[in-house]
């Protein structure tokens, strides 16, 4: 018998030990007992972190949508699968049952097929948080097409880069999106992006905000009439366990975003098993994750993990601040939400507002609270625990990454005692290690180091689309024979982990990972800019905000600096998206560089953080005098 559902701490330790002692047997039992396979595997796991190559359930055949939808139809056809809460609180929520989800996914899948999409083709999905987004991803999975969901806050340039990187044949979008009281012209952004994407033959457009938009004949088609004409059954494509399920882009320290490739069988098993345990989902619960499906949290814990468990998963189109900052709590009351999973940045924003916005709603349905995306600070943790959970609902501080596919370090509610700011213990099957700078593993407790994972787990990304070498260099080269996360962490006296943050040039702003390179490239496009460098500094609500140091070409640039700042942020918005705008921009005559020409970001970071008492070693700088000048003019 597998221990699919962990209920006590002792049970956790017992299951954990088994998962480390006999990992293949452990995962085999879970895979065997809780999922539908068209054909079982020949081999549970083969791996080599040197190549690197990892294969789970090799030889097995399945379709993930059969596991997420069809198999529930026998007992749960009329249960709500997707519960859609629209942006406008006065519009009706939609309850989409498992049967309706089945029919809609099949119709959508048939439309994709009719448009020539076949197994292995890449389809870009650029949609707001409306049911079509979940349905489109599942429709791709139904026919074996690889979905690449791009968060609908990204700009046309960012969208085009992602479409081209994975040669998407089709884009699925909508006539627009609501964002609180505003609307966004999504289709216009797609049109701009496609000027540079020759490979896209078809654009399917969902009608959502009912604006008048231009349709390019021969390329663009309204979705609804096609769906209406399509059959409500569609035989699932039988996939190999290691066939790609989706590509999802994440920022790297340098260069292009990385198209992380997730495969089918292991991803399904791991997201389902973590969902069940981390949220302790029970049959009639209503589960709500506030993330956008454009991020990994939405893929794994709005769509695949919950649906594989036959859960009711709530999808919210809107924002926490519209029509007021009580919106989340109003939704919790309205739908009697049992598990609520959100990000520290949202908690901090809500904690700034008056408690009356919380207290006017009945939150007694809540059983488990979750946090993800960045370290949760102590103050936010307590606010969440006291005012939302009323000290009754354990907080699961879940640490994981786009690359890991599923939750890696987390308490199991009602089993693991929580500790503010600690993600606590590794999930079964996960073998973390802390490394010192020299690559030696720190085995004792009460140490801090670089967080690595020593053994493969089923939902790990298998490669970077089109660039396996980069996958190897980024994750498997820093330390021998182990996956490097890019995060720093400490382990306390009882073995609990606390994630301390990125140790590379990725900056997490409001829970969004931003690489410095694409932002600097965007700034450098401004005709007046010679060079730039971006660093993060602490911000009350966003966690981190961006500080830009900009060198102008013409030192005597006479233009109004505030206008220049606006123009720079405008360019960033166009090239990357509004999430990457800089909070502070300092014009400077130089940047601290090493003799080999590398910008010393460590120093810039300290200046941005107003922590200049100890700048560390500046002796290797080519131009130490520039540091004084930057400090004197810091904002
Ligand atoms: C950070 C999001 C501290 C971390 C699922 C990681 C966290 C990056 C936590 C991945 C947490 C995520 N505590 N830090 N509970 N969760 N992070 O790819 O730096 O968007 O490497 O995946 O977010 O972000 P990503």
Image (cartoon, grey):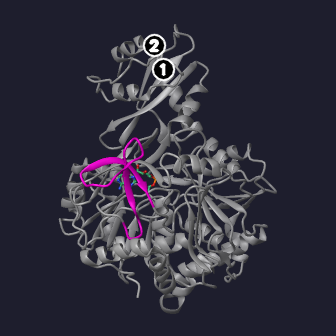
- Residue denoted by label 2: 623
Q: What residue is disc 1 on?
A: 593
149 or 54, nearer to the observer: 54
Q: CA distance from mark 1 to mark 2?
A: 7 Å
- Quarter holding residue 326: bottom left
Q: Nearer the viewer, residue 523 or 444?
A: 444
The boundaries of the magenta stretch are 427-454
Tag 2, which secondary structure?
Answer: loop
Query: Do residues under tags 1 and 2 come within 8 Å of each other at their CB atoms?
Result: yes
Residue 295 - label? none
How many numbered marks have been drawn onto this rendered protein structure? 2
Answer with left or right where residue 201 lies relative to residue 596.
Answer: right
- The quadrant the N terminus occupies is bottom left
Q: Position of residue 612 (x, y in %)?
A: 29, 23
Q: Does 439 lie within the magenta span?
A: yes
**Direction bottom: furthest residue:** 74
Q: Which residue: 24% across, 51% down?
A: 446
The verdict on label 1 being within 8 Å of ligand 1 is no
Q: Name the residue at 27% across, 56% down.
A: 422
């Amino acid at each position: 018998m597998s221990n699919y559902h962990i209920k006590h701490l002792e049970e956790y330790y017992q299951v954990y030990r088994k998962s480390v002692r006999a990992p293949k047997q452990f995962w085999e039992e879970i895979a065997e007992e809780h999922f539908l396979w068209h054909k079982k595997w020949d081999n549970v796991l083969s791996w080599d972190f040197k190549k690197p190559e990892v294969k789970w359930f090799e030889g097995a055949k399945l379709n993930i949508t059969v596991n997420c939808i069809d198999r529930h139809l026998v007992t749960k056809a009329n249960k709500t699968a997707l519960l859609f809460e629209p942006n406008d609180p006065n519009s009706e929520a939609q309850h989409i049952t498992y049967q309706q989800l089945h029919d809609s996914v099949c119709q959508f899948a048939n439309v994709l097929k009719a448009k020539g999409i076949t197994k292995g083709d890449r389809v870009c999905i650029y949609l707001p948080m409306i049911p079509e987004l979940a349905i489109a991803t599942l429709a791709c999975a139904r026919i074996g097409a690889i979905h690449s969901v791009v968060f609908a806050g990204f700009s046309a340039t960012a969208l085009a880069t992602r479409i081209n990187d994975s040669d998407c044949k089709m884009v699925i979008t909508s006539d627009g999106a609501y964002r609180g009281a505003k609307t966004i012209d999504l289709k216009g952004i797609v049109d701009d992006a496609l000027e540079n994407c020759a490979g896209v033959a078809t654009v399917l457009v969902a009608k959502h905000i009912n604006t008048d938009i231009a349709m390019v004949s021969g390329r663009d088609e309204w979705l609804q009439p096609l769906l209406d004409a399509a059959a409500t059954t569609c035989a699932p494509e039988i996939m190999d366990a290691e066939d790609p399920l989706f590509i999802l882009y994440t920022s790297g320290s340098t260069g292009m975003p990385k198209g992380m490739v997730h495969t089918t069988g292991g991803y399904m098993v791991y997201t389902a098993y973590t969902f069940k345990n981390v949220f302790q989902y029970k049959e009639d619960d209503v589960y709500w994750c506030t993330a956008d499906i454009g991020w990994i949290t939405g893929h794994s814990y709005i769509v695949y993990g919950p649906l594989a468990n036959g859960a009711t998963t709530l999808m919210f189109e809107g924002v926490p601040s519209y029509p007021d900052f009580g919106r989340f709590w109003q939704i919790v009351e309205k739908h009697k939400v049992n598990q609520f999973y959100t990000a520290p940045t949202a908690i901090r924003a809500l904690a700034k507002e008056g408690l009356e916005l919380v207290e006017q709603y009945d939150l007694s349905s809540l059983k488990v609270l979750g946090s993800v995306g960045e370290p949760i600070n102590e103050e936010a943790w307590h606010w969440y625990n006291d005012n939302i959970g009323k000290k009754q609902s354990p907080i699961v501080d879940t640490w994981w990454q786009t690359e890991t596919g599923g939750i890696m370090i987390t308490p199991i509610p009602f089993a693991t005692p929580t500790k503010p700011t600690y993600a606590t213990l590794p999930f079964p099957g996960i073998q973390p290690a802390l490394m010192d700078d020299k690559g030696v593993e720190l085995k004792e407790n009460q140490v801090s180091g670089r967080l690595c994972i020593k053994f493969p787990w089923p939902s790990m990304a298998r490669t970077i689309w089109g660039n396996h070498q980069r996958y190897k260099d980024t994750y498997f080269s820093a330390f021998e024979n182990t996956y490097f996360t890019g995060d720093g962490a400490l382990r306390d006296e009882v073995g609990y982990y606390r994630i301390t943050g990125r140790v590379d040039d990725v900056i997490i702003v409001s829970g969004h990972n931003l690489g410095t390179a694409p932002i600097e490239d965007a700034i450098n496009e401004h005709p007046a800019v010679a060079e730039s460098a971006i660093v993060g500094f602490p911000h009350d609500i966003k966690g981190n905000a961006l500080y830009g140091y900009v060198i102008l070409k013409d030192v005597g640039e006479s233009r109004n600096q505030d206008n220049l700042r606006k123009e720079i942020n405008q360019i960033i918005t166009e090239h990357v998206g509004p999430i990457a705008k800089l909070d502070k921009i300092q014009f400077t005559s130089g940047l601290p560089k090493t003799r080999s020409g590398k910008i010393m970001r460590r120093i810039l970071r300290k200046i941005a953080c107003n922590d200049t008492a100890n700048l560390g070693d500046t002796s290797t700088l080519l131009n130490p005098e520039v540091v004084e000048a930057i400090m004197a003019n810091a904002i």
